[in-house]
Amino acid sequence: MHELSIATQLMDQVLRVAGENDAGRVVEVEVHCGVMQQVVPEALEMAFEAVAAGTVAEGSRLVIVEDAMRARCRVCGHEYEPNIDDFLCPKCSQANAELLVGQDIVLQTVICETEDRAKL
């Protein structure tokens, strides 16, 4: 289950952000997961809940946004959305693609409450 590893790395970043902003509580975390990472949202949610326990992020809402793939053909330059198991360019039928989007996991937003309850 690579979701536990992902959740652990996300939590490290979330806690760093919370600490830098003197947050008393993390309310929401948004993460973008590229489809190539094959993240199972339910598994990531469970893992995130587990690693958040006992921290300022305990009870926070995890929002997972799946990013579709976007590729550019290195032969003809056409941009397209390949399938996870089919990288053939629809224009020239070559399978020589450069992935532009869809393979990263990015911590997008961390919403926190500070002592005065203002949101960051």
Image: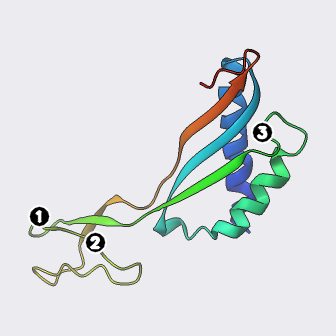
Q: Which disc is residue 43 wearing?
A: none
Q: In this view, which residue lies farthest toward the right? A: 54
Residue occupying the point 70% across, 62% down: 44
Disc 3 is placed on an element classified as loop
- Which of the two labelled residues, at mark 1 and mark 3, occupies the earlier sequence position? 3
Q: Where 71 sits versus 52, above or below?
A: below
Residue occupying the point 16% across, 81% down: 90
Q: Which residue is mark 2?
A: 81
Disc 2 is placed on an element classified as loop
Residue occupying the point 74% across, 48% down: 8
Q: Which residue is mark 3?
A: 57
Q: Which residue is mark 1?
A: 77
**In the rendered view, how is the structure colored?**
rainbow
Disc 1 is placed on an element classified as loop
> What is the C-alpha distance between the residues marked 1 and 2?
13 Å
> What is the C-alpha distance between the residues marked 1 and 3?
44 Å
Residue 77 drawn at (x, y percent)? 11, 64
